[in-house]
Every structure is written in structure tokens, then in C-alpha cells.
Image (cartoon, rainbow, N blue to C red):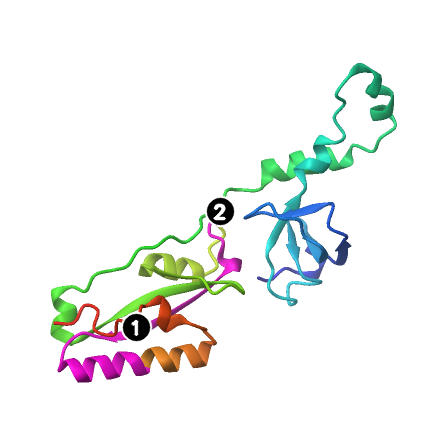
Amino acid sequence: MYYPKSQIKTNLYTNGDEFVFLTNQQPYTGYYFKTSTGQYFTGKTPDDRPNIEIILNLALAENLIPTNQSDYSILINTDTSNITSYNNLIKSTPILISPSYNAPVPTPQDYEIGEFRRYFCKKGNEILYLEINKETFDKLVAKDPQYQFSLYQPFNLPWKLTGTQEEVDKTNRNIVALTSQRLRLPKFGRYLKDDYLKYYK
């Protein structure tokens, strides 16, 4: 992601009480930066990847809300900027689309050509893969703001469909091995269940 320097505050730090990850609500401790739109991301700067979106901790805001009348005097002297910031963040933060499994099926034209292209994405630093369609792949590559593109690494590869079984198996196996090595995709073959004859005819 790219932000002009005038639109971000960098090298901020949280001790783990203020923020949680947007995706799983787990506490975040470490450096972060803030954008002019009121969003927060992990890393000292946009260049310090991965830049995963974090949000203000809801529990922190709830602790500022009085549970009985005697607590109101405490609330009057409490800085409620966190509540305001959180409410503004909730209003301004759209619900982002996560990629979902959607494996395309080869067309008759693909079988005439003898191969087609398969599209995938890997989630951040996790060994978690999803096969996706070209539309989702293009959205992630283009960093469409409606998608959680910062959390996923999109990639694709050609997939042989026709020929002898031995030839197809060997070709697809080599393509997966080379792609895994080039893009550092651990256990990608296992995700494919080592089925290098999938779609074979």
C-alpha cells in the first residue's frame, strides 16, 4: 500500500491494550501507523510489512461506560477520546471482503489448448491456501480497497490438461515445485493433495 507522508503518522507503538486485529479480534502489541482516514495498520511504516489492519479495542471503550450512577463522577474526569475515536472508526471502516474458495473448471476450449490457468492466494505468514477465480485474483492484485488484499498473497500457475498421464503428472508436479520455490509457498503441494492429474482427460 502507498500513502503520502503527509497522510500518515508513523512509528507509533502500542503495548497490547489499545488495539486488536480487525480479522480475529486478538490483541496486538508492537509498532503501527495511522492514516489520515482514521485507519491503523501494523508496522512502523507502510514499507514495514505485513501491514495488517488493526482497530481500537472495544473492551477498552466499554470500560469507560459507567455501570451505576456512582460511577458518573469518575466518567466526568475520564478522557473519552478513545470512545469517540472508536465510534468514528467503526463508522468509517467498511466491511472488507475476504477471498473464498472458488475453483474454476476447465472449458472445452481449455482442453483444446491443452492447459488452463489456476488462481490461488496464501494468507499472510500462515500456511493457509485458497483456490480462487480470476476475478478475485485480479481484485487482490489490483489492491481493490473493498478486499482484504493486505492479508493475502495472490499467485497463479498454468495447469496441463491433456497428454499422457505420465507427462501431465510430471509437468504439473514440476510447475508446482518451481512456483513453491520461487514464491516461498511451503506445503503448497500438500494443499493440492499432490493431485497432479486433476482435470486430466
**Front residue of this view, candidates 183 and 7:** 183
- In this rendering, is residue 10 above or below 158? above
| Label 2 element class | loop
Q: Quick one: label 1 or label 2, which is nearer the N terminus?
A: 2
What residue lies at 67% left-to-right and 49% top-to-bottom? Answer: 36
| Residue stretch in magenta | 146-174
- Position of 90 with respect to 194 (left or right) is right
Instruction: Kindly report which numbered mark, 1 or 2, lies closer to the viewer in this rendering.
Output: 1
The residue under label 2 is which amino acid type? Leu
Let me know if residue 37 appears in the view.
Answer: no
* Picture quadrant of residue 165: bottom left
Residue 44 at x, y percent in the picture: 71, 62
Quarter of the view holding residue 155: bottom left
- The residue to which callout 1 is attached is 194
Q: Is residue 88 above or below residue 38?
A: above
Q: Position of residue 77 (x, y in %)?
A: 88, 28
Q: Position of residue 87 (x, y in %)?
A: 66, 34
CA gap, disc 1 to disc 2?
A: 32 Å
